[in-house]
C-alpha cells in the first residue's frame, strides 16, 4: 500500500500530491466541499428547503405524487430554472382561477 501511495506522490498525480488532504486534493466529496466553502451548505440547504416546499405545494394543488416528485427532483438538479418555472406556472394558474371565480358586474 505504501508503494502505491508514494508512487502517486512521486508522479504528481492531481488526485493526491505531497502535503495535500481530501479538502485540497480536488475531492468530489460533498463533505469536503462543505468544509472548504461553508456557504455551499447554506445554498444547498435553501435549495432543498425550496424543493420540499415545491413538492408540498404541488401536492396541495392536486398534482399526483409522481408529478410533485418530479418538480422537487428538478428543483434540486436545476434550481435556477425549475423553481422559477414552477412559480410562473403557479401564479399563472392562480390568475386564471381567480378570473374564473370573480363575479361579473352588469352595471350599465
Image (tube, rainbow, N blue to C red):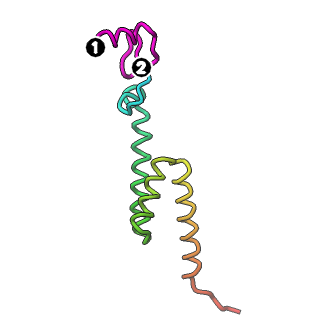
Q: Residue furthest left?
A: 1
Q: Quadrant of residue 22?
A: top left
The residue lying toward the viewer, choosing from 91 and 7, is 7
Would you say residue 8 sits in the magenta stretch?
yes
Picture layout, residue 26 above or below residue 93:
above
- Residue of label 1: 1
Report whether 93 appears left or right of 22: right
N-terminal of the pair, mark 2 or mark 1, is 1
Confirm or deny contact between disc 2 and disc 1 (CB under 8 A): no
Examine the image and state in which quarter residue 32 appears: top left
Q: Which of 27/46 is in front?
A: 27
Toward the top, the furthest residue is 10
Residue ID for mark 2: 24
**10 to 97, vertically: above or below:** above
The x, y position of residue 62, in whole percent, is: 43, 72
- Give how far apart the Cα atoms at labels 2 and 1 are: 22 Å
Total numbered circles: 2
Q: Secondary structure at mark 2?
A: loop
Rendering coords of residue 2 (x, y %): 29, 10
Identified at 55% across, 54% down, the residue is 84
Q: Secondary structure at mark 1?
A: loop
Rendered view: 93 above or below 49 = below
> Quick one: label 1, few (<14), some, or many (20+) residues within 10 Å?
few
In this picture, is 68 found above or below 28? below
Q: On the image, which quarter does residue 53 sit in?
A: bottom left
**Residue farthest along the right direction in this orientation:** 108
Start-end of magenta stretch: 1-23
Q: Residues within 10 Å of mark 2 (few under 14, many from 20)?
A: some
Q: Residue at x 35, y 8 (%)?
A: 6
Amino acid at each position: 500500500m505504501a508503494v502505491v501511495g508514494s508512487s502517486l506522490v512521486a508522479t504528481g498525480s492531481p488526485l493526491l500530491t505531497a502535503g495535500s488532504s481530501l479538502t485540497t486534493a480536488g475531492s468530489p466529496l460533498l463533505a469536503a466541499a462543505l468544509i472548504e466553502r461553508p456557504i455551499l451548505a447554506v445554498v444547498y440547504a435553501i435549495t432543498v428547503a425550496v424543493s420540499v416546499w415545491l413538492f408540498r405545494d404541488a401536492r396541495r394543488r392536486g398534482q399526483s405524487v409522481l408529478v410533485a416528485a418530479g418538480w422537487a427532483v428538478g428543483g434540486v438538479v436545476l434550481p435556477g430554472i425549475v423553481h422559477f418555472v414552477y412559480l410562473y406556472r403557479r401564479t399563472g394558474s392562480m390568475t386564471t382561477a381567480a378570473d374564473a371565480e370573480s363575479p361579473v358586474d352588469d352595471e350599465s
